[in-house]
């Protein structure tokens, strides 16, 4: 473990002792001859490799006067210009990004920095309101004018000194529009491609955030999840995604599906950066400095004695199961106890979740649309449905809007039957995790995050339902995807779940798992591959 400077230690304090002592292990650096867009991650003019550098390392260099936020921001803007035409992950960059970076540089020069995210470029999923940039949820219906105010989480990022670099593409309306959606497509941004193999899907709905990170177009990004929309793109694009517990990250100013499940969360190329970003998003940096966060699992024996329940999900295929077998062996060799588990109640949870979301979406999207201005902007779900009917560009890939129509006809959330359904659903999801963890005395439940990425096909739509994200998503409990390996060229993530508001313990465990698996590697932007990618 390399010696760290005082600046790094200060940065680590922003998430407490959870991150103290993390080794910044860099795996999978690009080899000469890799077939990938230029420039590669190495940035000699900065003295860093953007593929592998961490926020604490960047802050060290800024504190020592060897790097500026302006230079870092310019490097990412150049990469976006050079690489994004290949993957279509970034919808737009912020014209004020360089001015934000210059303000951070002034704070660094005068010793008045605001914490570890000061001067760090961040991309936002385009369902997160920004007062000075369009926020469209991928739909032309919201493209007329920007919101009047920033989302609460954007205010926290700005207050922390982060550089808002731009907005990322997403599955339109966060994949809650068509019965057969194609993840990563929106009428505003077109189709986002998986950087590992360009004809493969990036998963959704935070497709642009994940693909941009895989391509090193920003240091961190913000995604959102109702069920799987942070962790699946993270797994399929070989990056880290943290779906927080419901509550710590404000949903104010985020285009909704369901207040009962929606949450924004950090995405990054390593757990360190995700944890530092979560500390800012959740507003608990002071609590972290006071020692409220605890548990250093990152020393050489960091997994020793930890009990992890492996939910194999063989339905995702033999190749994914082989990755889980190798993962279990690695964790056991590191001293963890791995036991196989099957969380209960999954069938009933699956039966109840979709009907509940239909009612909640109607309530919550009407409330959100009422906040948006514009002569042609729909004011409610009924007007949104009519907008899509009369705009052919909205029908080029998401041909239908069956979920919108079903939501319009769904029982209101005041209906007693809906209330009973949501109460049963949430209770079963919480029990599925709580009972499994208690019965086996677990520190976390682990499962495959994703299958290998399927070929993108608008006519067919997505060809997989991935059940691993559902228990934590419905319960409002935290989950975290870290790279676990690959099937051919295509990344596979390991999803870790824990109990309610156990985010910091889960991040600490995830850092230890990430360190041991050492599975990250840079994408090669292959045009196609013969690797089997569906069940």
Image (cartoon, grey):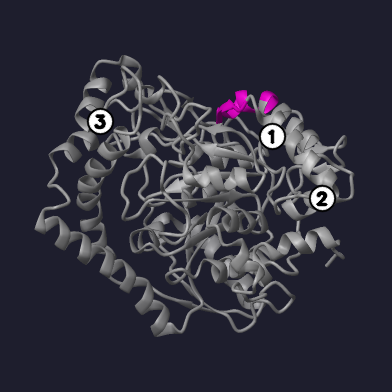
Q: Which is more toward the observer, 402 or 91?
A: 91
Query: Quick check: is 452 in the magenta stretch?
Result: no
Q: Which is more toward the observer, 72 or 345?
A: 72
The answer to whether any part of residue 37 appears in the image is no
Q: Mark 2 points at which residue?
A: 111
Label 2 crowding class (10 Å Cα cut-off): few <14, some 14-19, many 20+? few
Q: Nearer the viewer, mark 2 or mark 3?
A: 2
Task: Mark 2 and mark 1 in contact? Answer it, CB < 8 Å.
Answer: no
Q: Which is more toward the observer, 11 or 18?
A: 11
Q: Residue furthest left?
A: 416
First to last magenta residue range: 81-94
Tell me if residue 72 comes above or below residue 282 in the rendering: above
Separation (CA) of disc 2 from disc 3: 52 Å
Q: Mark 3 points at which residue?
A: 401
Q: Which of marks 1 and 3 is in front?
A: 1
Location of the N terminus by quadrant is bottom right
Q: Name the residue under label 1.
A: 100
Tell me residue 533's x, y (percent): 48, 44
Task: Mark 1 and mark 3 in contact? Answer it, CB < 8 Å.
Answer: no
Separation (CA) of disc 2 from disc 1: 17 Å
Whether residue 382 sits left or right of residue 203 in the image: it is left
Tell me residue 51's x, y (percent): 73, 44
Whether residue 440 sits left or right of residue 257 in the image: it is right
Element assignment for label 2: loop
Q: Residue at x 37, y 76 (%)?
A: 434
Element assignment for label 3: loop
- Choose top left, top right, bottom left or bottom right for residue 81: top right
């Amino acid at each position: 473990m390399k010696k760290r400077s005082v600046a790094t230690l200060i940065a680590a304090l922003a998430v407490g002792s959870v991150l103290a002592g993390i080794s910044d292990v860099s795996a999978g650096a690009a080899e000469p001859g890799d077939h990938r867009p230029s420039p590669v991650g190495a940035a000699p003019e900065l003295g860093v490799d953007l593929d592998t550098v961490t926020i604490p390392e960047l802050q060290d260099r800024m504190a020592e006067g060897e790097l500026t936020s302006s230079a870092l921001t310019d490097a990412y803007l150049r990469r976006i210009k050079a690489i994004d035409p290949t993957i279509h992950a970034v919808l737009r960059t912020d014209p004020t990004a360089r001015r934000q970076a210059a303000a951070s540089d002034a704070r660094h020069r005068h010793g008045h920095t605001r914490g570890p995210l000061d001067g760090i470029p961040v991309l936002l999923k385009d369902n997160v309101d920004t007062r000075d940039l369009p926020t469209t949820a991928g739909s032309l219906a919201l493209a007329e004018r920007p919101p009047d105010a920033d989302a609460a989480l954007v205010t926290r990022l700005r207050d922390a000194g982060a550089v808002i670099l731009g907005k990322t593409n997403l599955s339109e309306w966060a994949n809650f529009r068509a019965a057969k959606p194609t993840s990563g497509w929106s009428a505003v941004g077109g189709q986002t491609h998986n950087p590992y193999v360009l004809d493969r899907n990036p998963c959704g709905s935070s497709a642009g955030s994940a693909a941009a990170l895989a391509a090193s177009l920003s240091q961190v990004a913000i995604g959102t999840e109702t069920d799987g929309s942070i962790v699946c793109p993270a797994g399929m694009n070989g990056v880290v995604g943290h779906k927080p517990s419901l509550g710590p990250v404000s949903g104010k100013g985020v285009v909704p599906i369901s207040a009962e499940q929606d949450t924004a969360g950090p995405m990054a190329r390593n757990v360190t950066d995700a944890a530092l970003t979560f500390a800012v998003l959740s507003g608990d940096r002071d609590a972290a400095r006071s020692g409220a966060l605890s548990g250093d699992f990152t020393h050489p024996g960091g997994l020793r004695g930890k009990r992890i329940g492996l939910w194999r999900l063989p339905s995702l295929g033999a190749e994914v199961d082989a990755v889980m077998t190798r993962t279990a062996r690695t964790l056991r060799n590191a001293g963890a106890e791995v036991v196989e588990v099957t969380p209960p109640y999954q069938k009933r949870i699956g039966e109840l979740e979709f009907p509940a979301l239909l009612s909640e979406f109607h309530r919550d999207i009407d409330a959100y649309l009422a906040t948006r201005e514009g002569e042609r902007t729909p004011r409610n779900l009924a007007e949104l449905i009519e907008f899509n009917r009369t705009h052919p560009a909205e029908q080029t890939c998401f041909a239908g809007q069956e979920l919108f129509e079903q939501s319009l006809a769904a029982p209101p959330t005041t209906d007693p039957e809906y209330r009973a359904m949501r109460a049963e659903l949430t209770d079963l999801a919480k029990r599925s995790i709580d009972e499994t963890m208690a019965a086996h005395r677990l520190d976390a439940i682990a499962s495959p995050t994703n299958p290998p990425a399927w070929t993108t096909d608008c006519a067919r739509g997505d060809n997989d339902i991935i059940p691993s994200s559902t228990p934590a998503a419905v319960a409002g409990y935290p989950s975290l995807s870290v790279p676990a390996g690959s099937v051919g060229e295509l990344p596979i993530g390991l999803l870790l779940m824990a109990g309610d508001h156990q985010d910091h313990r889960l991040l600490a465990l995830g850092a230890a798992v990430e360190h041991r698996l050492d599975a990250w590697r840079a994408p090669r932007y292959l045009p196609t591959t013969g690797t089997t990618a569906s069940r």
